[in-house]
Structure formats: C-alpha cells, structure tokens
Image: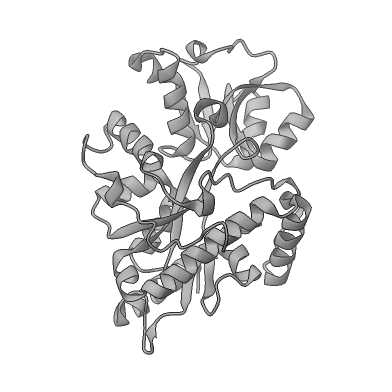
C-alpha cells in the first residue's frame, strides 16, 4: 500500500471515532509525517523522554509543509508543520486549525542565502528584474523573502513582477546556478555550506540580514483535537519546547550525535552525513512561544500579493500558547 492510500485509510479510521479520540479517553499516540534524513523537534523530544506517556507514530515522509498541515487539518495525521504563511492561508480557508508552537526559524546559523555566480553582473535588488531565481517552493518562505528584499530596496511592483521565480529541487539548485540556467539560487543548510566551500559564488543577501532572528514556521493541531485531548496537547507542546531548548544549550556535537543515533535506530536507510552540518533549529522565542508578528508578517505579504483579502484574518486568533507550559526552570 502506498503512503497516500495509507494516509487516507488512517484518516478515515480516525474520522470514524473522531479525530484524536481513543476509546479510553485522551489519545496518547500522535500520527505525523517526517522528513528524510532529518530529526524534527518532536522526534528529538520523544528520544529525550520529554513526551512522557505520549508516543509518536510515523506514517511516512513529506517534502512539503503546506501538504503536511493540510494532512493535519483533514485528520490524516494529528499534527503538521509549515511556514507561517501557509498556516495563515490555510486558516483563511476556514480550516479548523490552531498553531501551538514554533519549530523552525532564522538566526545567525540557520538562514537561507540568495547567491549569484562570482562573475555575475547582479549587484543589488535593482539588477534582478529579468533574472531567474531558483527556490525550493513557490508561494512560500523563499519567495516571501525575495519580495520583501525587492520592496525594501525600492524596486517597483511592475519591475519586481519581471523577476522570474522557478521551483527547483534543492539538490539541483546549485548546479542550475553554476550552469547558467538561473541567475540566483536560494540555498540553505548543508547545500549552502557545500556550495560556499566549492567557491565561485557570492551572496546577494540572506533572510537573517533582512529580518534578523525570527521564528518562521509552526506546528498546528485541529481545534477538535485540542478540545478532546488538552492534556495530551500540553504534554506534546511542552515536550517539544523542552527539546528546542535542549538543542540550544547542549554542545552542538552532542546534539548531532544524538540525531544521528535517532536516524540510525529508526532504520529507514537514510544518510546521516548531512546532519554534520546541523547548526540550529533557528527558533527565536524561548520554548517556541508564538508571537503575533511572526504570523502578521505573512498575513501582510499574502494580502499584498492578492492571495487573501486585507484584514481577512486576525492573527491572534490563529495560535495559542496555552498548551506550552515550558519555563526556563522546567
């Protein structure tokens, strides 16, 4: 049975007894999708023992945040995570979801850079109209950063519209840049670091320089799940918060070693070498607590693009920190 059919089946089974329900009261098992070769904060939290009697059930991998939160909204999984713009857009479509904790973001170590070839004539935002920019997903984080960069540097809307945005698999983006198929490549993490080691490219800007430290994505659960399983939700969210803080304070080598051990033990034939380049989850706030501005930025961007109506959503209604009981002391 392929993953899509499996998810549909498990979603249907969950719907049969109510999403998140179990015959004995609150559910203690959360279904989720992972990412190949990565250890996300809930997986780290479980391994550290921070989830108590709550367990995670992996049902497959995803390559798309929007797909992941859509799966959560429809009950195919119990939680999903995505870029905050996708969360806003899904909420505007009346999906019954609530963001409960930030799980990734941008800081000095964890950022996406916009790179050109060393001999490129592109020196500033005003040189970008007519250029091709390769990024992993359209309508998400990378495109939002590009739009903000163009706007802040005085590029007119008509000219900004002439910047061609292309969706490319991350593993192919550097090659496309070096071969001249695109003029700008958006690179992050191991792909960025390896490309810089090879040389021949230079940065145009990065999202940390543009906006400083900020949390960029959140995990969501359905409102029904939160009503039916408040204690499970609290255990889950607080455990994830603890894992985020552990990853900040533990020596980097220890974090990487633990992640490699997790990947090795789950037995999915994944390459652990990319984890050597892990530096940070990039979450800005202590314990991943969510702030209005982290969603308002994307609400404003989506409205500017015409994807949602201005004022279509009150961002404070989209999230809750109620289930996050983490404090520095505990």
Picture coordinates of residue 121, whole percent (x, y): 61, 10
Q: Quadrant of residue 185?
A: top right
Q: Residue at x 66, y 32 (%)?
A: 174
Q: Quadrant of residue 17?
A: bottom left
Horizontal side of 305 relative to 270 (left or right) equals left
> Can you name the residue that lies furthest to the front here?
329
Horizontal side of 137 relative to 94 (left or right) equals right
Looking at the image, residue 17 lies above or below residue 65 = below
10, 247: nearer the viewer = 247
319, 204: nearer the viewer = 319
Q: Residue at x 37, y 37 (%)?
A: 298
**Residue 40 shows in this picture:** no
**Residue 150 shows in this picture:** yes
Horizontal side of 169 relative to 216 (left or right) equals right
Q: Residue at x 31, y 30 (%)?
A: 305
Picture coordinates of residue 187, whole percent (x, y): 61, 34
Picture coordinates of residue 256, whole percent (x, y): 74, 55
Q: Residue at x 40, y 38 (%)?
A: 139
239, 27: nearer the viewer = 239
Looking at the image, residue 47 lies above or below residue 287 = below
Quadrant containing the C terminus in the rendered view? bottom right
> Can you name the residue that lies furthest to the bottom here?
24
Looking at the image, residue 209 lies above or below residue 109 = above
């Amino acid at each position: 049975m392929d993953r899509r059919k499996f998810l549909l089946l498990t979603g249907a089974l969950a719907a049969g007894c109510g999403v998140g329900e179990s015959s004995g009261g609150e559910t203690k098992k959360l279904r989720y999708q992972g990412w190949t070769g990565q250890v996300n904060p809930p997986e780290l939290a479980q391994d550290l023992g921070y989830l108590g009697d709550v367990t995670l059930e992996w049902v497959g991998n995803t390559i798309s945040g929007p797909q992941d939160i859509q799966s959560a909204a429809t009950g195919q999984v119990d939680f999903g995570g995505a870029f905050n713009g996708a969360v806003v857009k899904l909420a505007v479509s009346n999906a019954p979801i609530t963001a409960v904790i930030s799980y990734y973001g941008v800081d000095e170590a964890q950022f996406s850079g916009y790179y050109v070839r060393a001999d490129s004539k592109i020196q500033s935002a005003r040189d970008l109209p007519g250029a091709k920019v390769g990024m992993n997903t359209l309508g998400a984080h990378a495109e939002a950063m590009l739009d903000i960069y163009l706007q802040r540097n005085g590029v007119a809307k008509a000219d900004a519209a002439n910047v061609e945005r292309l969706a490319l698999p991350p593993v192919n983006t550097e090659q496309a840049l070096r071969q001249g198929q695109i003029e700008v490549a958006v690179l992050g993490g191991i792909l960025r670091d390896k490309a810089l080691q090879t040389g021949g490219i230079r940065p145009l800007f990065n999202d940390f320089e543009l906006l400083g430290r900020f949390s960029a994505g959140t995990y969501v659960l359905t409102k029904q799940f939160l009503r039916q399983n408040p204690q499970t939700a609290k255990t889950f969210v607080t455990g994830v918060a603890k894992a985020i803080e552990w990853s900040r304070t533990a020596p980097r080598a220890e974090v990487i070693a633990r992640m490699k051990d997790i990947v090795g033990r789950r037995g999915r034939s994944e390459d652990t070498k990319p984890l050597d380049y892990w530096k940070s989850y990039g979450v800005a706030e202590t314990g991943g607590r969510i702030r209005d501005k982290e969603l308002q930025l994307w609400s404003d961007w989506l409205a500017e693009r015409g994807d949602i109506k201005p004022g279509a959503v009150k961002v404070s209604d989209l999230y809750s920190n109620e289930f996050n009981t983490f404090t520095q002391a505990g």
